Image (spheres, grey):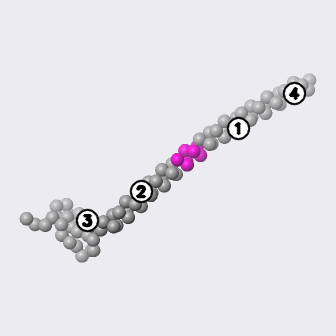
Amino acid sequence: MAERFQKTNMPGMVKDHATGAILNTNKDAFIAYKSRKAKIIESNSRIDSIELTVANLQVELQKSDDKITEIHSMLKAMVENNGR
């Protein structure tokens, strides 16, 4: 029975005869890749959370601005009615 994997001229790489794929057998590189990927996912999650917080703050700010405008209108009407 023939070997499924054949060493290549590239260090840490083998060729899979069944699929023709070149595979990386460097475990340290794989662990480093997984670590980088986890950090990217964590960073993206944090960014998503911050974006959601900003969006919520924008909505609350708009509500506050609407309330201030309403209070301003009420005060203006009260001043005009007392001036008569």
Determine the residue positioned at 51% across, 48% down. 48
Q: Which residue is mark 3?
A: 23
What is the span of residues highlighted in magenta in the rendered image?
49-55
How far separated are the C-alphas under marks 2 and 4?
A: 63 Å
Q: Residue at x 33, y 63 (%)?
A: 30
Helix, strand or loop under label 2:
helix
Q: Earlier in the sequence, mark 4 or mark 3?
A: 3
Of the two numbered discs 2 and 4 in the rendering, the one whose residue sits closer to the viewer: 2
Q: Give the residue type that dot 2 points to.
A: Ala
Nearer the camera: disc 2 or disc 3: 2
Q: Residue type at mark 3?
A: Leu
Which label's residue is closer to the chain start, 1 or 2? 2
Q: Residues within 10 Å of mark 2 (few under 14, many from 20)?
A: few
Q: State which quadrant residue 32 falls in.
A: bottom left
The nearer-to-camera label among 4 and 3 is 3
Tell me the SS state at disc 1. helix
- Tell me the residue that label 4 is attached to: 80
Q: Is residue 8 left or right of residue 66?
A: left
Residue under the image location 27 percent in, 67 percent down? 25
Q: Which residue is mark 2?
A: 38
Look at the image and say whether residue 52 sits in the magenta stretch.
yes
The label shown at residue 65 is: 1
Q: Position of residue 71 (x, y in %)?
A: 77, 32
On the picture, is 74 further left or further right than 49?
Answer: right
